[in-house]
Amino acid sequence: MFDVLHYHFMQNAVLASILGGTACSLIGVLVVTLNLSFIGTCMAHAALAGAILAVLFTLPPLGISFLFCCLAAGMVGPLADKGNFRPDTALAIIFSLMLGLTFLFLNMLSGPKSQGLNFIWGSILTVTQKDLGMMLFTCFLVASFIFFFFKEIQTIILDRQIAESIGIPAKGIYYAALFLIGITINSFFTSIGGMLIFSLIVNPAAAAYQLTYSLKKMFALSTIFGVVSCLGGLWAAYVFNVPAGAVIIIVSVLIFILALVFSPKSVKSLG
Amino acid sequence: MGWSVELKGITAGYGCQTVYSNLDLKVEDGEFIGIIGPNGAGKSTLLNLINGLSFPQRGEVIVNNQVLNKQNRRELCRKIAYVPQSTWVDQRLPLLLKEVVLMGSYGKLGLGRYPGRREKELAEKIIKMTGIADLKEKPIGHLSGGERQKAAIARALVQEPKILLLDEPTASLDWRAGQEILDLIYKIQQQFKLTTFLVTHEINQLPHWCSKMVLVKKGCLVGVGKTEMLFREDILTQLYDVPLKIVYDGETPSVLYGRSRVNV
């Protein structure tokens, strides 16, 4: 079965799986620990709306989807901060806006709409060298952010108000994290699928959250789970001839269920 | 030694709601201030103004002879330690007690720098001093309310502050845990001579410890002065709108609470 790795498209798909699994699951730790689980869906729909709008006006899809992601990220923070309500509520409002725009732009596409639908389901087997370059850059950006601001991230996870009170620019780090989530989704949604990518962000991190009390280990475990989900999904897609994006998500859910069942934290709370 | 704090002509509030109007307060360095008053009086707002978590609509907050503003807030608040009310923490949160205590040093370190040997040794020393050394490897979500408050105080001390702000540190703790926390705060204040602001409902403890009391009611300072001057039945009764009685055990005064003035 390793013969298939001789094909260039498959080599690209494996690399995209490793990079996608790493970046999405690293950023997922921020999403899970900062209680922004809904953000994946929101940003993914922002990217979708942007990409379909770009198709509509024959503009570069990734550029416009990136703008939409940044717009969504820029709206989430202020809405949650100034509106005096939970970030999840702010996300729900932006999510509904982006979903509405996605369907509106999709409806405005003339012809069979296949290009728009491709953004929804994704295609990891059509990843190009240019896509890989962008994925590598995103992976590097996410890993660098976590490395350089690890102690600030730790403090914000405990409490944003405490972080501000001790002189940490909590607001700046929080907004930077939001933009980084947007950038990550933008880089990978065409290969994983706009509808599915949020699961790859949340599931590996949520599984890691069940297994450790160390944030460093949580980042490491989440990365392993993310990469295993992507490679496992890709392998299953090849063997059983099923859509890769969907299987990647199913594998990540299975890992989460296993983590939940064997979680030492569950045993502790029952005891 | 602590820093002095002065609030001059402060008007502050949230949105359209004004909490303080034209408030003045002066506190010398090293003083231990007890802030009391009914719920919603504006006690926590006072602490937020001092550490720059909120800014006044009018007036000036002067910390160590410097007017606190958005430009110098981050620099000044590195020396102002804040212990908020104990809040719910997710049991599964991936943070250990020793990591939470070490966070006190993060503001001073600045962005992109990791704590070194000095910070780790200081955190270790303060963990021992606050009596939580045997808990340092425990996840923060597994600690009791009292243990978490001790960890919060230890974190505040690792900041090596000049001013210590404590917002109801004994809220929702049982009597013994509350007493332990208050004893610890007093010990720290005496040892480091920090300018300390303690918001509390444990008014019986104030005469033992606080040099000065600030009485807050509906956004007004209804009394500021030495504890022995303000710890009186008539003043406290008026403050809480509940008949209070002070009884003495030797020279130690204690407040007995009466029934509220509610007609059924």
Image: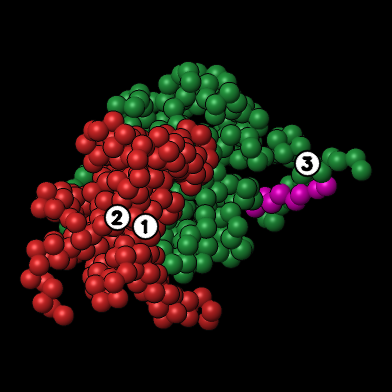
Towards the viewer: A168 or B264? A168
- Within 10 Å of disc 3 (Cα), the crowding (few <14, some 14-19, many 20+) is some
| Quarter of the image that includes the C terminus of chain B | top right
The residues colored magenta run: B251-259
Circle 3: residue type: Val
| Residue depicted at x 21% and y 63% | A17
Circle 1: residue type: Leu
Residue B159 in picture, x, y percent from top left? 31, 49
Task: In the rendered structure, find residue A196 and report the number of the disc placed on it.
Answer: 1
Q: Chain of mark 1?
A: A
Pointer 2: what residue?
A122
Task: In the rendered structure, find residue B212 and report the number of the disc placed on it.
Answer: none
Q: Chain of mark 3?
A: B
User: Is B240 on the left-hand or right-hand side of B190?
Assistant: right
Residue B130 in picture, x, y percent from top left? 40, 62
Q: Secondary structure at mark 3?
A: loop
Q: Chain of mark 2?
A: A
Compared with A216, A85 (above or below) is: above
| Residue depicted at x 10% and y 77% | A3
Compared with B107, B126 (above or below) is: below
A103 in magenta? no
